[in-house]
Amino acid sequence: MADVVLEKVEKRFGDVSAVSGIDLTVQDCEFLILVGPSGCGKTTTLRMIAGLEDVTSGDIRIGGRSVIGLPPRDRDIAMVFQSYALYPHMNVYKNLSFSLRLRHTPKAEIERRVQEVAAILGLSGRLNRKPRQLSGGERQRVAVGAALCRQAGVLLFDEPLSNLDAKLRVHMRTELKRLHQSVKSTMVYVTHDQVEAMTMGDRIVIMNGGSILQVATPLEAYDKPANRFVAGFIGTPPMNFFQGMLTATAGQGSVDLDGGVHLPLTRPVPEGSNRAVTVGVRPEHIHLSAEGRGNRQKVAATIDIVEPLGHDVIVTARSNAGIFQMQTEIYAGLRPADTLDLWFDTDRIYLFDRETEWAI
């Protein structure tokens, strides 16, 4: 077993709390993603699991054993860094086998592991090359391979794709997902890129300000965000937010947005829910027509900016309720300064308490 359990783990740097007493369980063979903006505590959490940062308080267990006070080499972990951390004077074979040679692993076992990992990662024909003779993607695969050769119970990834260009990042996302399915190892992966988190993780952990805001599958985080931060962080383009007042009468709710826009709600709302709210609407839930699935409410708008993406187009528009974005087909023929009626899907509206910012 190689599960990872964090109990009330806190990390302080002087008076600054980097991680605020978090609880988290990474299941055996799970691919878990820690995601959030810079400074949210995700990398500090990973480094505490690895033993590169001391824990101020709390406990960390790997495979049922507390690792507090243990050095990294005794924690049954292997780590892949953002900077690759390859030895430039060694060829690929020696980089892959370095940790095994340090442990005085028998030569036959080293050969078996290196050849096996090289075959998985497509590096069999590059074992004699130096890192400078490799592409960025190949260097990243060597760094991953060096971790795999250790056959550790837990693999830790610290933003390993951030140095790659956009096309290569997409390719490596697929490769890492395929790798996890192949080796069946427990993986904890840190990124600030919510697209990486959504496409790669079995579950994602959204962090901000040193705290965990939500732990969920990617689709759960998208469909049922726990609060306004999660709603705005997950999804591209990000969710639109409007200010309004929620009114509930006889179980039927509606929201009056600033600027006089009225949105009837299709789901029941408990009596006594009247309050100031923030209303969230995703760009893909705003339409050019009242036709189609879902209940739709008309909102008059003026087009400001049109950004073509190929099949889709991102449209920035102005209404009495505020500026927002919608995502629609590029062939809609929209132009800046066009005035038209857009339709909000009221089945897919999100409500957040304006004071606490938690979902209603």
Image (cartoon, rainbow, N blue to C red):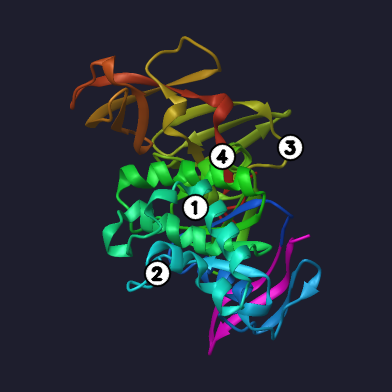
Residue behind mark 1: 118
Three-letter amino acid code at disc 2?
Leu
Tell which circle, 4 or 3, labels the residue nearer the N-terminal end.
Answer: 4
Q: Secondary structure at mark 2?
A: loop
Picture disc at residue 287? none
In-image side of 66 versus 279 (left or right): right
The answer to whether 269 is drawn above or below residue 102 in the figure is above
User: x and y percent of residue 224 in the render?
Assistant: 62, 40
**Which is closer to the viewer, label 2 or label 4?**
2
Furthest residue toward top: 291
Give coordinates of residue 157: x percent, y percent: 52, 61
As drawn, 154 above or below 338: below
Tag count: 4
Dot 3: element: loop
* Secondary structure state at the residue bearing disc 1: helix
Q: Quadrant of the N terminus?
A: bottom right
**CA gap, disc 1 to disc 3?**
62 Å
Front one among 132 and 184: 132
CA–CA distance between discs 2 and 1? Answer: 16 Å
- Dot 4: what SS? helix
Count neighbours of disc 4 (C-alpha within 10 A) and say few if under 14, some if 14 to 19, many if 20 or more: some
Question: For the residues marked 4 and 3, what is the alpha-carbon distance in whole angstroms?
Answer: 27 Å
Query: Is 246 inside the magenta-drawn segment?
Result: no
Q: Residue at 53%, 88% (x, y): give it.
A: 15
Magenta segment range?
1-24
Distance in Å between CA atoms under marks 2 and 3:
62 Å
Q: Using the image, determine if residue 219 lies above or below residue 188.
A: above
Q: Which mark is residue 222?
A: 4
Residue 271 numbered mark, or none: 3
Of tags 4 and 3, which is closer to the observer?
A: 4
If you read the primary sequence from the N terminus, does the residue marked by circle 1 or circle 4 appear first?
1
